[in-house]
Image (cartoon, helix red, strand yellow):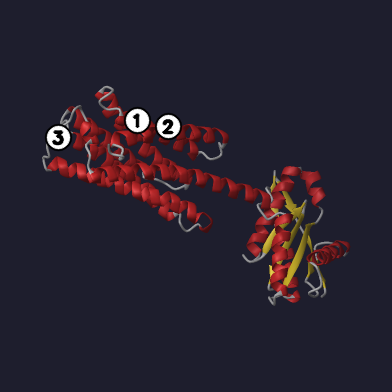
Amino acid sequence: MSLLPDLRTLMFAHGVFLLSAAIGFFTAAWCLRQFHSLLLWAISCLLMGGGTLLLALRGYVAPEVSILLGNYLVITACAVLVLAIARDFSSPIPRCRLLALLVIATGGVSAGYYFLPNTDLRLFFSAGVCGVMLIDAARLSWQKLHEPEMTGVLLGILLPLVLLVVGCLLIGALAMMRFLGGVPLVEDHVGGAIFQFGWLRLGAGLLIMLSLQGLYFSVILFVALRLNMRLRHEVQHDPLTGLYNRRMFEDVATHERARWLRGGDPFAVLFIDLDHFKWINDGHGHAAGDEVLRTIASLLRRQLREADVIARFGGEEFCVLMPGQSAQNAAEIAERLCHAVADLCIQWQGQSIRLSVSIGVALPQGSVETLESVLARADQALYAAKQGGRNRVVLQAA
């Protein structure tokens, strides 16, 4: 007895696996509703599993159900899979072409059943056209490979997609060659030729099934990575302004101090406080105060370098770490920020809101000074700026 399972058994097991995986995808789609693509993946997995199961049952159920409905489900599953990839990557997809391929595939299968009954012809339209359809999904995955944090998982999506395309096109090409070559089909039942043994056909079938399973597993990892990145962003950033929060700022500043101690360039710390912010909240409402904070955050991003680390420390207080800046340069930049804020005029519900900031500047005095000490001196300089009349810069000389 041969230990090699036949294609029908493999397809049946594959269909059952995909149906069970679909339950997990639907559960994940319900629990993680912010990931809208999960529902599309669940639908694709369900359709693919159901269609594969029906294809494996040909000879045991009505041909219209096994052949037509089974192929329709698999073809539709491929189209939904392409839409899921496009939704995951927030990329446009040529929907008209996708719809045209869907119509060609289903129409070809129908023609190969009703008008020109031939298993190879149906196989060409179902597998071959699905392979063409999936090329768009592989292209979108390739275009996203430049994102360094997700390269590994994206390769885990791209590789199964490429293998899936190769397997589908290979089966489609073999079927068309048999059809054009007039190879006679000997079938025990309608459509039974797909189960006839052949190493190339078995290999392509295994390639498709394993690629699909690998693809669905990679999608789970992709969603988990995106969820982890989102949670990490929420832990590290202020939700109102999108700037770093205090914890993240202190982590980055600690690394910058360590780099400086190893012989790097000095760094400067700016403490920035909005003057009379309480009056804005009391006079215009907290929504106006939030808009002011977002405006200041946007201004800081525009005025400072990409290498500078900007954070909201809390309330109306911001902090900036500027690597490679001398005391004079840091003071000049702080003065420029003061003038830029003073030039702002925020319109809120028909009223103009004018702003000003006070800024304290400090640089590390030596290798023995801790980061906490540098931040404390910048805070003292800020206090001196406020005591001196606000809307000014005070430098804590090193």
Q: Is residue 268 left or right of residue 8?
A: right
Q: Residue at x 33, y 46 (%)?
A: 207
In terms of secondary structure, where does tag 1 sit?
helix
Instruction: Using the image as rendered, state which of residue 283 and residue 297 is in the foreground.
Output: 297
Instruction: Using the image as rendered, state which of residue 291 and residue 161 is in the foreground.
Output: 161
> Are the residues flagged by discs 3 and 1 in contact, CB closer than 8 Å?
no
Q: Amino acid at mark 3?
A: Leu
Residue 286 x, y percent position in the rendering? 75, 43
In terms of secondary structure, where does tag 3 sit?
loop
Tell me the CA gap for discs 3 and 1. 23 Å
Residue 299 x, y percent position in the rendering? 66, 59
Q: Residue at x 19, y 37 (%)?
A: 120
Tell me the CA gap for discs 1 and 2. 9 Å
For label 3, the residue is 185
> Are the residues flagged by discs 1 and 2 in contact, CB closer than 8 Å?
yes
Could you tell me how many numbered marks the image carries? 3
Tell me the CA gap for discs 2 and 3. 31 Å
In terms of secondary structure, where does tag 2 sit?
helix
For label 2, the residue is 19
Q: Residue at x 39, y 38 (%)?
A: 80
For label 1, the residue is 53
Q: Residue at x 78, y 72 (%)?
A: 364
Pointer 3: residues within 10 angstroms few (<14), some, or many (20+)?
A: some
The mark found on residue 157 in the picture is: none
Instruction: Using the image as rendered, state which of residue 58 and residue 330 is in the foreground.
Output: 58
State whether residue 150 appears in this view: yes
